[in-house]
Amino acid sequence: MASPLRITDQVGRIVQLNEPAKRIVSLVPSQTELLYDLGLNEEVVGQTLFCIHPNWAHQSKPRVGGTKTIKLDLIHSLKPDLILANKEENVKEQIEQLEQEFTVYISDIKNLADSYEMISQVGLLTGKLQAALDLNHQIQASFDSLNSKSTKHKVAYLIWKSPLMAAGKDTFIDAMLQSCGFENVFDFNQGRYPETTIDELNHLNPDFILCSSEPFPFKEKHLEELSSLGLKAKMILVDGELFSWYGSRLAKAPVYFNALLNELHVG
């Protein structure tokens, strides 16, 4: 008989399966995409409304609610042998309810190293360890090609409009900003996702304000509105998935970052 699969997840919990997971529910969009990229098309039996990649799965797989509004009864009916959750994206009380009956893996990701660990652990628990290790090598090679400059350009990264909110330090987004050679104008004392104002942003005086496509879908009209209200820095629309998704989509991020850096003539 094969040895059980046993790991310590990213919040310090022991996760053990007697065999690779065959019925998986994912409550984390970036990790859902990872499962499919590892070749687990049939094993995924449920995912959230926000698990939009790949599109065919978004259209056809059972939807178990949003990341913070999961449908516990539906998940119970799917009888998963593994549930993927995330400390930040999911609601603690809901996950604790699921833990009473199911095996739950919880990720907690703030940088690339955490992503590599999560990808490897998910690969182990699903019988796709070699594919996960190969993916990590691909992501690492992609980031090695990132043409980030040593000169630090100050940026603010907006994630919400009303109220204005930014990605602060100790976040995965901040790690991606650093990989591009950017310096976040918000410091640790302001929290991970600080609320801000136009006056504060003008005072912080970033070289660029990056306006994300998610969770708030910033568009040109919003940039024009903020400018009309007195926001002075140059605002740029950016792909939020490539700054905040920490699964297999990471392999695509450096190409996008290089194009963005070239667009901004950074360096």
Image (spheres, rainbow, N blue to C red):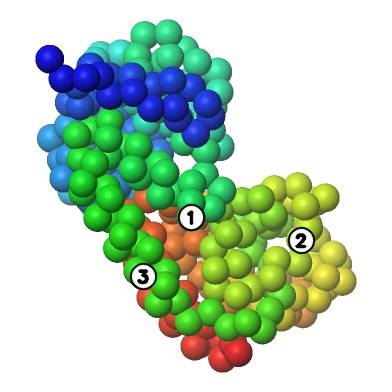
Question: Quarter of the image containing the N terminus?
Answer: top left
Residue 190: percent from left, percent from top? 80, 51
> Which residue occupies 66% across, 50% down?
170
Q: Which mark is residue 142?
A: 3
Are the two marked residues, 1 and 3, in contact with CB atoms closer than 8 angstroms?
Answer: no
Q: Is residue 54 visible?
A: no
Residue 73, by quadrant, is top left
> Which residue occupies 29% across, 63% down?
138
Q: Residues within 10 Å of mark 2 (few under 14, many from 20)?
A: many
> Which residue occupies 84% across, 65% down?
200
Secondary structure at badge 1 equals helix
Question: In the rendered structure, which disc, 1 or 3, sits on the residue that comes first in sequence?
Answer: 1
Q: Is residue 92 left or right of residue 247?
A: right
In this rendering, the answer to whether 141 lies above or below 97 is below
Q: Is residue 215 visible?
A: yes
Question: Which mark is in front, 2 or 1?
Answer: 1
Residue 20: percent from left, percent from top? 20, 27
> Which residue occupies 56% across, 48% down?
110
Q: Which mark is residue 112?
A: 1
Residue 227, by quadrant, is bottom right
Give amino acid for label 2: Phe
- 23 or 65, nearer to the observer: 23
- 144 or 184, nearer to the observer: 144
Alpha carbons under labels 1 and 3: distance apart: 12 Å
Q: Which mark is residue 126?
A: none
Residue 156: percent from left, percent from top? 69, 67
Which residue corresponds to mark 2? 186
Are the two marked residues, 2 and 3, in contact with CB atoms closer than 8 angstroms?
Answer: no
Question: In the rendered structure, which disc, 2 or 3, sits on the residue that comes first in sequence?
Answer: 3
Question: Which mark is in front, 2 or 3?
Answer: 3
Alpha carbons under labels 2 and 3: distance apart: 27 Å
